[in-house]
Amino acid sequence: MQLSILGQATRPICRSGNVNLSSRFPAAKLGQPWIPADRISDLVQLEPVLVFGGLALGSWLVYRFFLKGLNPERHRSLRRQFRSLLLHMASFATGFVLYDTLGGQLEPGDALTRGLSYLGLLTLVLGAIVLVKTFRILLSEYLFFSHMREGVPLLLINIFTLLFSIGVGGWLVSEIFGVRLAPLLATSAALSLVLGLAAQDTLGNLFAGISLQF
């Protein structure tokens, strides 16, 4: 009699324990990817591919028709940059085609959906690299065209390319992961002010040396 009473008393406890475990640890939340697939799909579109391809083609046309009088060293530099741009542009276009093709075939609950998000992120990174390389080529062409005979400091091109890369990377992180960059920009602005005041003489000599190159 006592055993039956104990058995009946323990049954609801076991049931309630199962209910609490399933409600606290739902199976649907265990396998969620850390990359937001909806934001990736909103960014991986045909328009950026066409725009980046048009910018790359425009930079090549400028080199082909307006920069024929460059010296051999500058020709080698630009051709090397164009080869690297072509390689990354092909990789970017391939990633977009694969993402677009697989995205139309997979169901939302498919196991390969997680891998599709990583492919979309890789495609976006390749697109950002293509944009930065195109910007670097256009900047080099502008400086070469403005100073056909004078030397162009590579440091100046690197500085502008680095600033542009930081801007593109910050926008990409903000759009994909929803990171708020305003507090970071405020902190970095204050830190830059302190560093600028501390290195005032060094920066003055640096920019004076750059200005002497023109």
Image (tube, rainbow, N blue to C red):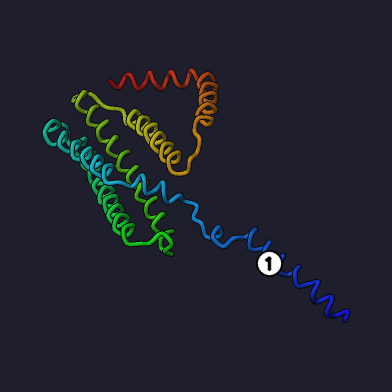
* Percent position of residue 197, x then y: 52, 18
Residue hosting label 1: 18
* In-image side of 132 versus 30 (left or right): left
Return the residue nearer the eye: 114 or 54: 114
Residue at 41% across, 35% down: 166
Q: Examine the rendered structure and indicate whether residue 93 appears above or below residue 172.
A: below
Return the residue nearer the eye: 129 or 31: 31
* In-image side of 208 versus 181 (left or right): left
Which residue type does callout 1 highlight? Answer: Asn
Q: Examine the rendered structure and indicate whether residue 20 appears above or below residue 189.
A: below
Q: Examine the rendered structure and indicate whether residue 35 appears above or below residue 161.
A: below
* In-image side of 96 versus 67 (left or right): right
Residue at 26% across, 42% down: 47
- Helix, strand or loop under label 1: helix
* Percent position of residue 21, x then y: 67, 63
Q: Report crowding for label 1: few under 14, some 14 to 19, many 20 or more residues within 10 A (C-alpha).
A: few
* Quadrant housing residue 18: bottom right
Q: Examine the rendered structure and indicate whether residue 90 appears above or below residue 50.
A: below
* Percent position of residue 68, x then y: 12, 33
